[in-house]
């Protein structure tokens, strides 16, 4: 049905239709009977898919990447659509409108998106109030909730640690894990926080607050050199981070079929090979010492399987949800179970132990 409906959706402005979809999901998320119907249609529960990572239990390894539900508007809808975890944000200490539109572009020939949203969000205080209201009304979500934190655009780089700490403090009661996002290409200067000296200062401040009471992960860019990645890995292990998320969107444009020339981060299928390459490198360097969440270009169950056998503990999707529709996670889980049966695996934990 989605394949029939998608051409009409793709004739609409990308950001406008995204906002309308989010409004619809937010409406559904507050209605129990409708959520139950969604769950029956789109969720697949099977104990063989369960994953345990950084102290949390995930019903399946497939999560919603940050950027789709920036303000936790549709939080309760995502488990009903089959997701095994949900990452909201990026959220900044200060509310901000982001970059001026147009700032989201489809590349259908490449099954890709370009965005330069610029961390548009309602700010940590307002999102925290929404999460508090949701918890009081409905209780905690049935799957782990990650909160992705970004730097406020108005905050200078030298004050970034205080900015992230303010967001972390306000949102602390509501996240099962937290992600430090220093890798978006759409906030001026943000990626400079991946440089060793600045990143060390930031990690020192945030890990001092967290003190391993909740998992803290770092999301990295795909455009780093191996030397830069090695420096980040050393810091991640020194400050005892709980895991890494690889990767964010890319500024590279090699091999695209579309002639669209827009600034911003590229996501979707063209990012897949580089995301997989970074995953393999991280896995070789870490040798299982830190869990890795793999993101970028995951469209099929074969893609999920490839990430898992190359060292990913969990995966996340975003662009493929736009192109494949609400049945995506169910398709991925079914295909993954089929591959596990072919390989004689009774659980994903067995795969990780190989």
Image (cartoon, rainbow, N blue to C red):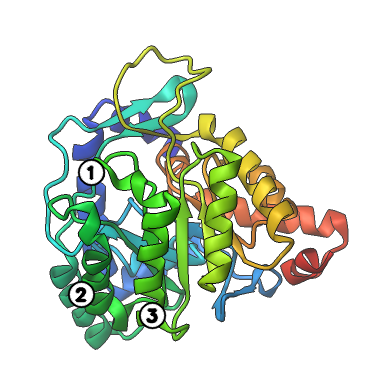
In this image, 286 relative to 155: left or right?
Answer: right
- Residue matched to label 1: 118
* Mark 1 or mark 2: whose residue is earlier in sequence: 1
Q: Earlier in the sequence, mark 3 or mark 2?
A: 2
Q: Which mark is residue 351?
A: none
Q: Where does the image place residue 106, in percent across and percent down from the top left? A: 34, 28
Q: Is residue 78 visible?
A: no
In this view, the mark in front (3 or 2): 3
- Count residues near mark 2 (Cα–Cα under 10 Å), then give few for <14, some for 14-19, many for 20+: many
Q: Quadrant of residue 249?
A: top left
The disc label shown at residue 128, or none: 2
Of marks 1 and 2, the one in the foreground: 1
Which of the two residues, 251 or 53, is positioned nearer the viewer here?
251
Residue closest to the far front: 197
Residue drawn where x is 36% and y is 69% of the image: 35
What distance separates the C-alpha of mark 3 from that of mark 2?
A: 21 Å
Give the image location of residue 224, x and y in percent.
51, 40
Q: Are marks 3 and 2 in contact (CB under 8 Å)?
A: no
Q: Are marks 3 and 1 in contact (CB under 8 Å)?
A: no
């Amino acid at each position: 049905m989605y394949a029939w409906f998608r051409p009409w959706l793709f004739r609409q402005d990308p950001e406008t239709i995204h906002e309308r979809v989010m409004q619809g999901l937010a409406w559904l998320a507050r209605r129990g009977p409708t959520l139950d119907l969604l769950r029956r249609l789109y969720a697949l529960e099977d104990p063989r898919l369960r994953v345990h990572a950084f102290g949390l239990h995930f019903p399946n390894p497939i999560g919603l990447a940050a950027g789709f539900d920036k303000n936790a508007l549709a939080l309760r809808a995502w488990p009903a659509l089959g997701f095994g975890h949900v990452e909201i944000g990026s959220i900044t200490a200060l509310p901000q409108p982001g970059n001026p539109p147009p700032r989201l572009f489809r590349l259908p020939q490449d099954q890709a998106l370009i965005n330069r949203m610029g961390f548009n969000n309602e700010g940590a205080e307002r999102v925290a109030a929404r999460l508090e209201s949701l918890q009081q009304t409905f209780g905690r979500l049935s799957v782990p909730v990650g909160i992705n934190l970004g730097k406020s655009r108005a905050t200078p780089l030298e004050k970034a640690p205080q900015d992230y700490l303010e967001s972390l403090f306000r949102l602390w009661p509501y996240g099962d894990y937290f992600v430090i996002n220093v890798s978006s290409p759409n906030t001026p200067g943000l990626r400079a926080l991946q440089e060793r000296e600045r990143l060390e200062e930031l990690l020192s401040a945030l890990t001092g607050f967290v003190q391993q009471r909740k998992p803290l992960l770092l999301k990295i860019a795909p455009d780093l050199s191996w030397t830069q990645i090695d420096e980040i890995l050393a810091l991640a292990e020194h400050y005892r981070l709980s895991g890494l998320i690889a990767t964010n969107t890319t500024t590279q444009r090699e091999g695209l079929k579309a002639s669209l020339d827009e600034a911003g981060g590229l996501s979707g299928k063209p990012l897949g090979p580089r995301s997989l390459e970074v995953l393999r490198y991280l896995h070789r360097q870490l040798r299982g010492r830190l869990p890795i969440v793999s993101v970028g270009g995951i469209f099929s169950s074969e893609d999920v399987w490839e990430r898992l056998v190359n060292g990913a503990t969990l995966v996340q999707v975003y662009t493929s949800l736009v192109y494949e529709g609400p049945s995506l996670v169910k398709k991925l889980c079914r295909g993954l179970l089929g591959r596990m049966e072919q390989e004689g695996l009774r659980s994903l934990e067995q795969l990780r132990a190989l």
